[in-house]
Image: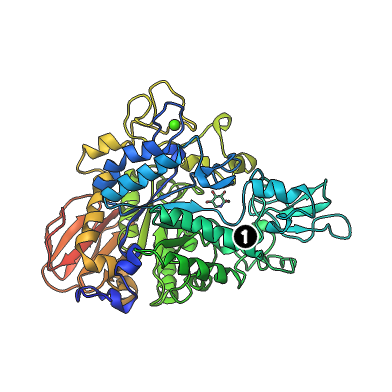
Amino acid sequence: MVTDTHDPGDERGRTDESHWWRNAVVYQIYPRSYADTNGDGVGDLPGITAHLDHLEWLGVDAIWCSPVSVSPNADWGYDVADYCDVDPALGTLADLDAFVAAAATRGIRVLLDLVPNHTSIQHPWFVESRASRESAKRDWYVWADPAADGGPPNNWVSTFLGPGWELDAATGQYFLHSFLPEQPDLNWWNEEVCAEFDRILRFWFDRGVAGFRIDVAHMVVKDALLRDNPSATERDHWMEQLRGQVQEFNSCRPEVHDVYRRWRAIANTYDPPRLLLGETHVFDVDALASFYGHDDELGLAFNFMFMHDEFALDRLRATVAETEAALVADAWPVWTMSNHDISRFPTRWCNGDDARARCALVLLLTLRGTPVLYYGDELGLPDTVVPDALLRDPVTIAYRGMIDRDAARTPMPWTAAPGGGFTDPGVDPWLPFGDLATHNVADQRADPGSTLHLVRALLALRRSTPDLRAGAYADLSADLSAEADAWGDAWGFRRGDHVQVVLNVGTEAVTVPVAIGDGVVIAIASDRVGEGDTVGDSVEVEGGRAVVLVAGVGPAH
Ligand code: NOJ
Ligand code: CA
């Protein structure tokens, strides 16, 4: 158990090495877009290894790398043709080993992306499965006879919209694809599939990989009877309304928890235990909480309610409060604002406003829970407008105007020079650069007032301040109802006894009570003004500004 008496983490779950991820800051890398070392315009594993200096300097504890496994790239790595090898465009298994080892020497752990819901249509398992109804691997995928009218076996639709079933004319049956037709769903009722994934987990864990982000973790097991989903009503989430149905029978099935209990048992045989971080795309906190089990399933389960909220403090406050209430001692929150599937937060939440983006970063890095930064978040990087002719994501191309994933997948801007420090000058990157002049690592590193330095200071403060990692969360703006007017557009919360955060995203200054005792200083301000200043019983925070107050200790630099 926790030995640090200053650390109230023991009230809300363990924060020792057996749950190392609860103390960690995770950084997601989209490998095709981080750094290209061989001049083909595509980021690669040696490129990530070459930039570990940046991540060590920033102070991240773990990297989650989007898929590096062999893929025909119908869905850029999320259609896997070999789970135990590296895609040649990204490097070799030796490059992966070198990356994991080099990261370890800097105290950085590496998580890979595991895609258990489906394979590529080109995976040898599926090629064998579709060869005949008698194939030894037929049952590894979800095959079903046509309905009486010859149509699909049930009403399930693809997450990417459109039918969820594809007819295989040669064998006269349909196969299920919860995403693209090039991504057939595995059948998790088949014990051989389960055993094969046990082997895949161990293959990577044995190589020193610290865990997995699990793709579409909520959908892996389907209803054994393939029952029709009910229609969505106007009370259901907008995404369900868009699909026209509630995913009652192809998502969040009770048996999915057996899979994660099985995997957690494997993960816990390693030292340190390996992390299972689920992409749990669910719409209520109770469903989210279920994926943690009794600390015997996922170690962390992504919170999409937070990411899909508007950047309206009332909305976010409510989601944080609901999450805090639902995730009790066995479960630990994880917060993220951007990833490779959604518009970047400086655009989506902040409309390009730098001051608001800095406030959002203060929020992400001061909530109770594990923060996950997406590459470029540390620069406040906005979306890149990708011209139609240069789009690469089939889903973006199919749903132009509705879904835009390429805008958030463009190359990391390292410098303002031609090639952006990402690739050789004159080489066309696989997706176009954004505005290299306005956001790049080199310029922000040279500017102590930059967003990059703010993020680094927040990470350093987390490391030196136990309350910021594990202290209980208390929403001050809700508690102090008598002072409600004083809070205006501000959100204040306490972390343990020694830290208070105030975010003011309005335009008017607010003066709010300080609720953490004596010797309080502004440890970090989003605009870096006034850091180290002492504050008394109240603090004034101007619009578009956030401050982190710490009692009884000096500012962290
Ligand atoms: C979620 C991934 O994040 C997304 O990029 C992918 O298209 C789907 N899962 C299907 O694997
Ligand atoms: Ca390359």
Q: Residue at x 63, y 43 (%)?
A: 399
Q: Secondary structure beneath disc 1?
A: helix
Q: Quick check: can you spot residue 376?
A: no
Q: Quick check: can you spot residue 226?
A: yes
**Which residue, as the protein is rendered here, is positioned at the far right?**
149
Q: Nearer the viewer, residue 224 or 459?
A: 224
Q: Quarter holding the N terminus?
A: bottom left
Residue 140 vs 330, above or below: the answer is: above
> Are there few (<14), some (14-19), or many (20+) residues within 10 Å of tag 1?
some
Residue 25: x percent and y percent? 32, 57
- To which residue does mark 1 refer? 193
**The quadrant where residue 533 appears:** bottom left
Q: How many numbered circles does the render carry?
A: 1
How is the rendered protein coloured?
rainbow
90 left or right of 82 in image:
left
Q: Nearer the viewer, residue 34 or 130?
A: 130
Residue 539: x percent and y percent? 19, 64
Residue 548 vs 422, above or below: the answer is: below
Query: What amino acid is labelled 1 in the image?
Result: Val
Q: Nearer the viewer, residue 497 or 419?
A: 419
Dot 1 beta carbon under 8 Å from ligand 1: no
**Which residue, as the protein is rendered here, is positioned at the far top?**
426
Q: Residue at x 54, y 65 (%)?
A: 283
**The quadrant where residue 545 appears:** bottom left
Residue 18: x percent and y percent? 34, 68
Q: Residue at x 29, y 77 (%)?
A: 10
Q: Residue at x 64, y 51 (%)?
A: 179
Residue 491 vs 114, above or below: the answer is: below
